[in-house]
């Protein structure tokens, strides 16, 4: 059986303007980078990567942008949602000094893998890239686990003024980075990949998803790689061969939409 | 589609394509139940004009591409078939059997007179073979198959999904956003085998069996019921895209073990 299981929302926390974290009870094993399908009965069902992993409780963080996230945003603790998963492959930690680059809400799903790296005592440098400082969240949580946190803002309201990928380029030349992990706008991730050359690279891709179990083809990229099942994490080698990466995605009708 | 070709599929049936782009239904669109998949995708597709790009990418491949099309009127079916032919499709498959798209699909496929008109109009306008995919959600599938044959269809494809529903007990909500959907996979194989068995004895055109084919033995069962070929969909979920290689190999192993040399020897073996 692969259907939503009804659970109640444990907590709903505001992280920044229009951004919330919702937690629910889920006692199973979940890897950083994996996702759940979250069903809001009568509204929609959408994929959500985990941003919080503890033994019995899992959580996800989202920005209010569409019907489903709007509905989720206004649900209070105790409300019922359907959950199925976890789906997808998750990140694989390699190397000793790791660089994490999160663009926008992309940082949310990177936090669990940073925390996992820190638990293994791996040196972790994190770049959070946002448009402006009001959109910043999880900075404290990342510092608390012992990561070195750098902030970039498009408008220079905090930290480095400019793109996260430019700041990352800087770090990559100055420091001895063994591996790069990223989630954010795809053109940013594509630029980052081109800076990595031989450095191992893993990126989490986002596509419009329907079935989430590898059968419908909606989220396919390149030569039939399914983001829901073969991803959502892909390595640099795969992405360099993927003609779609950073170029276009598909809408609900399967039409190609340039980034 | 390229990946399915690489995984050993002998031919590819496209998603059903219509005149206009269509987003399909909200999620949930696909559930796995105890014995099969229940889906209400809602015929999402980029529309026939944009679909040319996708077909173009597959032109180098030697694998035949069967263009599946859906429409509400005869004129639209003809226009779509024309485009598919231009795009290099080896055949067209008329989807007159989607159980959950209003105006399209089943509403066309349970009206023998309308179906006859559609099939004969398409046949007059295109040179490539025309297949007709039928629904089991009708009173008499043989009558519908005969109407398609009278319209000069080149083959019958049976069956499309069986209309169904799944309700969540905690919230009393039907889980699929469209509420009802089409059931596929192992659970519907006996229904498909029965339909093929009935149709194949009453028409003189080939029948393509579909519904729950997961292993080589499932395919053999469809051949014995009268199918000349089989289609696979849900089993991609159960066995991965490699299912095509596996099933082909399993058919060969079964035939060797039982002393059959050609699939033709198996077709209709159950009529005795």
Image (cartoon, rainbow, N blue to C red):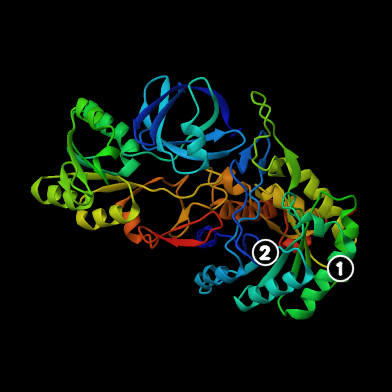
Give the crowd class for mark 1: few <14, some 14-19, many >=20 residues within 10 Å: many
- Front-most of residues B188 and A19: A19
Residue A181 higher or lower than A257, as above or below: above
Q: Position of residue B105 (x, y in %)?
A: 75, 57
Q: Pointer 1 indicates a residue of which chain?
A: B
User: Is residue B203 in view?
Assistant: no
Q: Position of residue B32 (x, y in %)?
A: 62, 38
- Write the residue at 52% across / 41% down: A67
Q: Is residue A115 left or right of residue A207?
A: left
- Write the residue at 67% across / 64% down: B68
Quadrant of residue B179 in the image?
Answer: top right
User: Is residue A67 in view?
Assistant: yes
Q: Is residue A117 left or right of residue B203?
A: left
Residue that label 1 marks: B116
Residue that label 2 marks: B68
Q: Earlier in the sequence, mark 2 or mark 1?
A: 2
Q: Secondary structure at mark 2?
A: strand
Q: Is residue A135 left or right of residue B259?
A: left
**Which quarter of the rendering shows the N terminus of chain B?**
bottom right
Residue B252 higher or lower than B205, as above or below: above
In three-dimensional space, the C-alpha distance between marks 2 and 1, rounded to whole angstroms, equals: 18 Å
Task: Specify the farthest residue to the left.
Answer: A174
Quadrant of residue A62 in the image?
Answer: top left
Q: Secondary structure at mark 1?
A: helix
- Write the residue at 86% across / 57% down: B199
Give the crowd class for mark 2: few <14, some 14-19, many >=20 residues within 10 Å: many
């Amino acid at each position: 059986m692969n259907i939503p299981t009804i659970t109640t929302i444990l907590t709903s926390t505001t992280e920044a303007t229009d951004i919330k974290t919702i937690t629910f009870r889920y006692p199973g094993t979940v890897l950083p980078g994996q996702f759940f399908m979250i069903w809001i009965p009568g509204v929609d069902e959408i994929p959500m990567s985990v941003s919080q992993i503890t033994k019995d409780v899992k959580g996800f963080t989202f920005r209010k942008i569409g019907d489903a996230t709007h509905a989720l945003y206004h649900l209070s603790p105790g409300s019922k949602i359907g959950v199925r998963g976890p789906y997808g492959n998750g990140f694989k930690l390699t190397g000793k000094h790791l660089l994490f680059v999160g663009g926008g809400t992309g940082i949310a799903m990177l936090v669990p893998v940073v925390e996992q790296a820190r638990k293994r005592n791996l040196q972790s440098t994190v770049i959070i890239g946002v448009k402006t400082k009001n959109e910043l969240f999880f900075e404290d949580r990342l510092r608390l686990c012992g990561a070195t946190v750098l902030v970039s803002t498009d408008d220079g309201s905090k930290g480095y003024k400019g793109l996260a990928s430019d700041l990352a380029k800087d770090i990559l030349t100055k420091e001895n980075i063994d591996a790069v992990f990223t989630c954010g706008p795809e053109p940013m991730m594509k630029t980052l990949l081109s800076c990595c050359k031989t450095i191992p690279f893993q990126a989490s891709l986002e596509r419009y998803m329907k079935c989430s179990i590898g059968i419908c083809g909606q989220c396919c990229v390149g030569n039939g790689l399914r983001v829901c099942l073969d991803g959502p994490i892909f390595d640099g080698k795969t992405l360099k061969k993927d003609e779609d990466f950073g170029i276009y995605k598909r809408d609900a009708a399967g039409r190609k939409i340039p980034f | 589609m390229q990946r399915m070709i690489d995984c050993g599929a002998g031919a590819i049936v496209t998603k059903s394509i219509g005149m206009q782009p269509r987003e399909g239904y909200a999620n949930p669109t696909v559930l796995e139940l105890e014995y099969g998949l229940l889906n209400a995708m809602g015929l999402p597709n980029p529309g026939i004009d944009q679909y040319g790009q996708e077909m173009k990418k597959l032109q180098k491949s030697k694998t035949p591409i069967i263009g599946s099309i859906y429409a509400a009127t005869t004129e639209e079916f003809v226009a779509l078939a024309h485009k598919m032919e231009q795009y290099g499709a080896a055949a067209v498959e008329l989807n007159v059997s989607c159980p959950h798209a209003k105006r399209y699909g089943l509403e066309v496929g349970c009206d023998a007179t309308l179906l006859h008109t559609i099939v004969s109009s398409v046949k007059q306008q295109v040179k490539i073979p025309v297949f007709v995919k039928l629904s089991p959600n009708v009173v008499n599938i043989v009558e519908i198959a005969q109407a398609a044959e009278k319209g000069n269809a080149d083959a019958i494809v049976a069956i499309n999904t069986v209309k169904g529903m799944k309700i969540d007990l905690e919230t009393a909500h039907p889980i699929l956003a469209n509420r009802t959907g089409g059931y596929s996979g192992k659970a519907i194989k006996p229904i498909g085998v029965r339909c093929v068995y009935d149709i194949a004895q009453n028409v003189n055109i080939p029948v393509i069996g579909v519904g729950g084919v997961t292993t080589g033995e499932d395919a053999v069962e469809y051949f014995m019921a009268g199918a000349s070929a089989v289609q696979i969909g849900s089993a991609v979920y159960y066995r991965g895209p490699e299912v095509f290689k596996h099933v082909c190999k399993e058919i060969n192993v079964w035939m060797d073990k039982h002393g059959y040399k050609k699939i033709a020897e198996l077709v209709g073996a159950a009529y005795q």
